[in-house]
Amino acid sequence: MQFEQLYEVTQKLAVPVDTEERRVEWCDESKLLGLARQPSGAFELFLRGDPLPVRSPLVRRHVRHDIWRDAEGVDFQASRIAFPAESHYQAVAAFIAEEMFRNGLIDSVARSFTASEPIIEMALRRAALSDEAIIGLIGELRLLTIFMSLAETPADRAAAHDAWRGYQRDARDFVFASTSVEVKATRGNRSIHQINSLGQVDPARAPEGNPIEQLYLVSFGLMPVEPEEDVAGSFTLPSVVDELLLKLGDSTEPDLRNEIQEILTDRVRQYGGSSLGYDHDSMSTWPAYSIPFRQRCGRAYDMNDDAALVLRRAQLAPCEAVREESVRFEVDLPDQITGDVNPERDLLTFARRVLN
């Protein structure tokens, strides 16, 4: 099929009401490729058959393979590729479909997909948060959940909620009066993190050099759950957001939320500084955000401790030709810095002390 024909198909796609329903418009007689929309309005490309041979990690996050049942009650396998609901992705979905037909879809869905995957990857590059941003957001929201769990009144919960600043670019992740918390998350169980500014590891200081804030760096180690593993006890980005919503109100449903719940979802949407951040209401079912994780470790490092051997502003000061804001580096924080107090591994106890 030609692009114009496929674009016409996208124009007549019906938006289903049920999250488990799709009204697929098949684009060939063998029903190998179909176009559909999610209840959120997002566009989907259906590819009938066995799981696709996905090579790109980015594309893999956007592909989901399921078993569906057609109107005649016959089960069939299909992989889905999700695109945002923004109007320009309507043309993108039609273009990708045309590319797959041009690459021999009728002869082999798998070979056609492999030939088209670089184009699909390019189209998806701005469609969702990066892997790093996703686990970074999960880390911050996991810590926010701990703070919320210690809040005894609605006012306390609102205060903990307002302490989260990580959705704002270049802001501390959490601010409680003169105590600040930076959150870093990575895959694995070692605290190896990219540091984007000295202020993430060195507390703000008075002109004479004394710290004027207490700075902690909370390090999360997260690991994705493998397909063959039991997902019990794991969590996804949507499940973490839902857990927080229930700490702030009685329902996760958009029409039943209170004002502070709406503020939370709006701030989550702003995370990463992208126009296409994580929109919980429209993206919670996307394969890209449905990856389950387990927490491998959680450590709270006291960055005011001089035994934490990281780069400090005082060390950079003699290098007058170096602009501080340009400095980027990686840290590999040890499991033990100062006895059993730094880092602190009981994040609940740590959070209670910060709140008090």
Image (cartoon, rainbow, N blue to C red):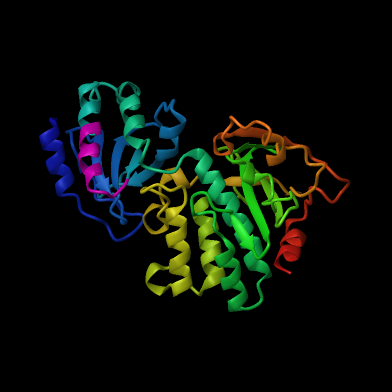
Counting labels gives: 0
In front here: 162 or 232?
Answer: 162
Spot occupied by residue 240 in the image (x, y as percentages of width and height): 55, 57
Spot occupied by residue 165 in the image (x, y as percentages of width and height): 54, 58
In front here: 245 or 46?
Answer: 245
Q: Is residue 88 magenta?
A: yes
Spot occupied by residue 261 in the image (x, y as percentages of width and height): 47, 69
Q: Residue at x 15, y 37 (%)?
A: 6
Give left or right: position of 212 versus 18.
right
Residue 74 shows in the view: yes
Q: Residue at x 22, y 48 (%)?
A: 87
In front here: 254 or 259?
Answer: 259
Residue reaching furthest to the right: 339
Q: Is residue 85 magenta?
A: yes
Quadrant containing the N terminus in the rendered view: top left
Give left or right: position of 304 versus 249.
right
Residue 252 shows in the view: no
Residue 308 sits in quarter: top right
Give left or right: position of 86 versus 65.
left
Highlighted range, magenta? 84-96
Give left or right: position of 115 versus 88.
right
Depicted 353 relative to depicted 182: above or below: below
Depicted 200 relative to depicted 265: above or below: above
Classified by dominant secondary structure, the portion drawn in magenta counts as helix
Spot occupied by residue 99 in the image (x, y as percentages of width and height): 23, 27
Quadrant containing the C terminus in the rendered view: bottom right
Q: Residue at x 70, y 57 (%)?
A: 213
In front here: 93 or 260?
Answer: 260
